[in-house]
Amino acid sequence: MNGKGWDRVRTARLGGDGAAAGTTGIGSRRTGSVQLRQMSSQTVRLGRVQPQAPSHRTIYCNDRDANLMARFKVNSVSTTKYNVLTFLPKGLFEQFRRVANLYFLMISILSTTPISPVSPITNVIPLSLVLLVSLIKEAFEDWKRFQNDIAINSTPVDVLQGQNWETVPWRKLQVGDVVRIKQDGFFPADLLFLASTNPDGVCYIETSNLDGETNLKIRKALERTWDFLLPDKAAEFKGEIQCEQPNNSLYTFTGNLIIESQTLPLSPNQILLRGCSLRNTEYMVGAVVFTGHETKVMMNSMSVPSKRSTLERKLDKLILALFCGLFLMCLIGAIGSGVFIDRKYYYLGLFGNVEDQFNPSNRFVVTILTMFTLITLYSTIIPISLYVSIEMIKFIQCAQFINKDLHMYHVESDTPALARTSNLNEELGQVEYIFSDKTGTLTRNLMEFFKCSIGGEAYGTGITEIEKGQAERLGKKLDEVKRSDTAIHDKGFNFDDARIMRGAWRNERDPEICKEFFRCLAVCHTVLPEGDESPEKITYQAASPDESALVNAAKHFGFFFFRRTPTSVMVRESHVEKMGNIQDVSYDILNVLEFNSTRKRQSVVCRYPNGRLVLYCKGADTVIYERLGDTNQDIKRLTREHLEQFGSAGLRTLCLAYKELSMDVYEKWNEKFIQAKSSLRDREKKLDEVAEMIENDLILIGCTAIEDKLQEGVPACIETLSRAGIKIWVLTGDKMETAINIAYACNLINNDMKQFIITSETDAIREAEDKGDPVEIARVIKESVNHDLKRCLEEAQQYLHIAAQSLALVIDGKCLMYALDPNLRVNLLKLSLSCTSVVCCRVSPLQKAQVTSLVKKGARKITLSIGDGANDVSMIQAAHVGVGISGLEGMQAVMASDFAIAQFRFLTDLLLVHGRWSYTRLCKVITYFFYKNLTFTLTQFWFTFQTGFSGQRFYDDWFQSLYNVIFTALPVIILGLFDKDVSASLAKKYPELYKEGIKNVFFRWGVVAVWAFFAFYQSLIFFYFTTAASRNGHNSSGKIFGLWDVSTMAFTCVVVTVNLRLLMACNSITRWHSLSISGSILAWFVFIFIYSGVMTPHDRQENVFFVIYVLMSTFFFYLTLLLVPIVALLGDFLYLGVQRWFFPHNYQIVQEIHRDEVEGISRTEFLEIGNHLTPDEARSYAISQLPRETSKHTGFAFDSPGYESFFASQAGVLAPQKSWDVARRASMRTSKKTSPK
Amino acid sequence: MNDYHGSAAGPSSGSGDGSAPRRNSKRPKYSKFTQQELPACKPILTPRWVISVLTLVGVVFVPIGVASLMASNNVVEIVDRYDAKCIPGNMSSDKVGYIQDDTIDKSCIRTLTVPKDMDQPIYVYYQLDNFYQNHRRYVKSRNDAQLRDSEQADKTSGCDPEKNARDGSPIVPCGLIAWSLFNDTYSFALSGKILTVNKKDISWKSDRDHKFGKDVFPRNFQNGTLKGGATLNPNIPLSDQEDLIVWMRTAALPTFRKLYGRIEQDLKANDTITVTLKNNYNTYSFNGKKKLVLSTSSWLGGKNDFIGIAYLTVGGLCFFLATAFTVVYLVKPRKLGDPSYLSWNRNPSGH
């Protein structure tokens, strides 16, 4: 049951905005939350004026009647945009906010007046069809949201009713109810934590839905409420909660619990937020505090700023140009009508009382009114169905192609790609800059324990790929050490050395230090074990994968950490006393000295069962070495060498050290520690200082080396993308060395490149920092950054001009902060744009967003951000296209993204295949739409000249209204879905083809002009050929055609030609193409046969009655039907032929190279590998690209953001608001401003 | 653990598919559609294709052009513009005054010489110029319901300004089109012998049968202050008033021909036809030409070189282009799919 509930909620969070449903839904929720926020701020303001307005709420627990007064919100949530009543008005309102729809509404209104030459149906029918399709889509999406809401709202939960737990759906939950949540269950509302089955009243929760962090957090109930666990006891609980009004701050809560006139303060530590789930706890009992939309997660529900693609913005310009064309045409016609109208045409009956429009005595009025007439007549120049067609095409592209592409399906994590918005498909085809997070995106965030050094002895026989590469370049052949049978390759453990495995360490030179090493690994950490307490089944929950890799390693060495209580750690130790002996040892954890980025280390004070007090410490080599005692210089020297070896092999290292403590020293220190811990001001600083006092005179044990594994196929993908003209920037929170190392491994930087490094780790800056004057520090850094930038820029220009060398820029966060200053920004931009790769390290989430918008706004290039974690959210939202890595833990990035893929390497498919296709297809669709409407309208325009500029329509009303929605609608959609210039595999084989998208080759004004020219040419042919050919009698009967015969003939030619022109634009012709094109032409004939064959009793001008039968009885019809389309298309044909012959596009050459190949992709190819390089190939490729000189750095592990908060929440300390949270808020604010829609 | 498995099976049994436990996988199903691998033909417009298509068009068009042109050439057409010539010399400065003066006899005699043998039927057309039958005000000034159905005689909507007679009763047929009905008449004589003009079946059958009622008779027609054109015999139903039917099928262009009748008698070359015409219709107000046309017809229709010339020109052009392209192709062939044409190969720096 739990599992089921979990499943549902997860789908709710994941799929809630499934596929393309995303934007709108989120948009509405954003406005919702904005309103709520405004409301709450209003109540606050009102509160000052009217004291009676409550600034806090009082909740009577377990007493539904008492709470009735307060009228709290119910717990059902609704994310729908409409309900049955509001659907039509609101939906229509939304539709008419589009300019095109509004324009057609106005035209429709205009066409009901006598001014109009066309009957209202001409415009009403296309408009209503377009509206209908859009409304159906809206309704469908809202229905999905509604279903989702129902699923969430009816998730069962146990509520205390009388003395029993009763299962009710979530929506029936009320404020004040006492509920029971079982293990792995989700919290249905914001709860006050009362009791749990765990001792000490703690429970563990997972907050990945909230902040994307997967580590468990501890919540602790007030001691006073620990007993209210069983139903009979819980029924006695009658407390009163006074707390703040609902707000959106996830990390704060203020309130009091009043039990039996005893007031107990409440903190966030007792609050369990909706959206989190219960872990490692059989069940817990809580009281509902906030429900439904008032829960913190709902009030905080994230918004995705709605993005419009660049192509669409360009399209707006095209539409504007069309409007100008329309205006010009109308103006010409209107002036003509003013000049033409004259009483001499007596047959027009212009005597007596003539309506204003034809009154020759006031030519000005005639001109003005004819202007309006012509606007309605030429309204078809604006392609009304364009937007809805594009929407449909994009929707299907997303839902059917991107989401279901087997190339982008990741088998291991069972994750297909997910397009969360459908309006950015073609943007994917024009990306020029990719901003990538490192951890979890380029690398797997999978740390494998690879090597170690204990007491000056290096262990581990593995050879990293970087080492292999170095060896290969030196021409040496490394003897591949054959893996012994004992080798274990577990998740996070890839180590083999018979000397220390399986208790063999007992025979080593110094088994004692080995023991310390293993104990340090098993004890000094903050990992939580989960699951069965057996070595096979246990899983470790840790903030950083380094940590769990180390604990895991300890397990394999025979020191199995299996249980943690708040005060102790249980380790099952093997082979300690003698070989084969297993015993459980419990270490009391007395203090945890937390990790943070200044300390770069972490320590634990523990007490052995025999009373021995030891401080274990692990951390970066630099900080540990500073704090070592003077003993054992040999080990220090040897370990230092090993550290450098490991570092150059691309491994992440940590030093391990310990220190024996005497009781009295510890007691003295502990007092200070407790003082610092309870101090209210500068607590962290004081804690650091206290820690410093005991972390000295350490004894070095050794070091560990962990391999940070690259994601599969990353180097190959990056190579492909850069061949495609895409520049990849890595923005990471990691250290510069780590970042550079990964950049090398990923093929972003190689030794042929000129590197520019701008870092704050210079002596001058350090000196200034030591003095501690913030103003001075800022000045020094700014100056040095300014200097560096100028110098680099000069050099860069030299290199570019003279050597044509590719450049790389590495900059760290601190310098970036100053470089982003408005004064220096220009230089930064210039420099970074001339570099092929840029690596920004140590950057905050906000800076990631700033860098992204620097390029987006400063350089006006199309940007894509890809990341997996909460710290990438701001960057994802800032870029044109945001891509989230899904399938791993944490939904934050995915929720903010526009597309979610499981692996970085799928970017190749997403951009080069789907993006490129979407772009070329949409360009074709748009230009074709433009062409077909222009052609059609221009024939009308030429006719105007022949009618005395009276605005007489050439075509029947129904022809005109159905032209866009039936006779030419489907084929262009088919083209937009299926057109394929080159196959997917060729698109990836020739990534350079992608450059055409970056340069926007297919939607330039030049391209539009060519289409416009041929539209002009064709319309002339249509009008003048048909009229010239139809002048005299036809057949042997000598009878003459009238206006409607000629216009039907012309219309037939237009429909046939326009459809055939589409066929000429196709690169690949599937069954669907031929079906839809012949279907459209057939539809016209079927329509005209029926339409002109019947007479209706309705008041209809029987203009076209029998016209087609009359026409088809003449040879004229067939001769014209052969002549006109061929002459019209001859121009296009010659253009296409000559263009291809003499000025071929790249894709055309590729088509030709592979013209004889059958695109036979067997299904088996899809089975597992989506990458065209096998992993081995990719590896060896990556190796060959590695740096040639050995760097002396020793990248230290534990360097992931989010680590600090882990400790904070572990210790029950209020976590500060995270920087990315701030960034997110900031981006939400700006999004509100920038997109007022 | 068990709990989880139980629930995992839940949705799949619920979906009613129950095929396999793998059902739970999110792996997209393979289909040619979703993987965008629909079988397709990929035409490449190679020079060879361009040349072949052009040749083909030429091969098809030239014969059609020749046939059409021959058909058109076989048609014998006599065109006689009479609007100016039928005005007595003394009135030539005041043409409008002449035409509007009912007292003057409008008879006029024209003599036409047959240039070539003309086989019957010989069609008689009148051709007007600068007459905007397609003007918006003109085109909509009719009511089809009224024309079709005697019950709806009072339906005159859209007929402004020729809607009702002075007493308010509806005009049938109402509207400007009918009101301005052409009223010149022609009679022909060949060497003193009258050539009968058959005025039956000069309109499209569908118009006669369906658009003009057999029981609809003209009423109040041409009773207004101004007389626009011809009058109608109120005793003949509209479906038999073929001149009106022809006139009411409004023309597409301001210059148009309308069928007047048929002479069902062969004419020999150099025959002289005397045409006695009543020059009633006012085209002088707007400087419109009036022409009388006698024409035979071919399988294609009347004399119209346009289609033939167009076909021939296009066909010839295609031949020419095909030849030109062939020469270019032979002189400087482009190897299909030559990778050196790829922009990044042409210009290694990539810019």
Image: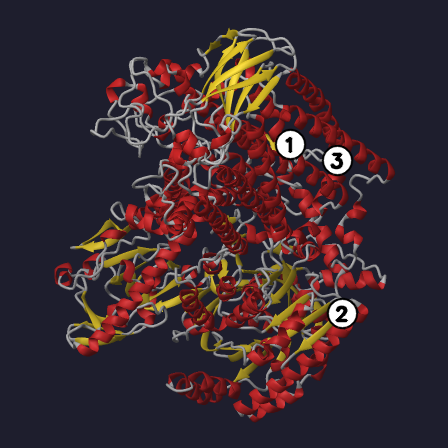
> Which residue sits at x=80%, y=32%?
B323
Circle 2 is placed at which residue position? Answer: A800
Disc 1 on helix, strand or loop?
helix
Q: Alpha-carbon distance for marks 3 and 1?
A: 20 Å
Circle 3 is placed at which residue position? Answer: B46
Tell me the amino acid under the disc marked 3: Thr
Q: Alpha-carbon distance for marks 3 and 2?
A: 40 Å
For the residues beneath circles 3 and 1, the answer to whether they share a chain is: no
Marks 3 and 1: which is nearer the front?
1
Q: How would you rate the neighbour count of disc 1 (Cα within 10 Å): few for under 14, some for 14-19, many for 20 or more?
A: many
Q: Is residue A374 left or right of residue B274?
A: left
Disc 3 on helix, strand or loop?
loop
Residue A728 in picture, x, y percent from top left: 64, 62
Q: Nearer the viewer, residue A358 or A26?
A: A358
Q: Is residue A1191 left or right of residue A1064?
A: right
Residue A721 in picture, x, y percent from top left: 67, 55
> In the rendered structure, the residue with mark 2 lies on which chain?
A
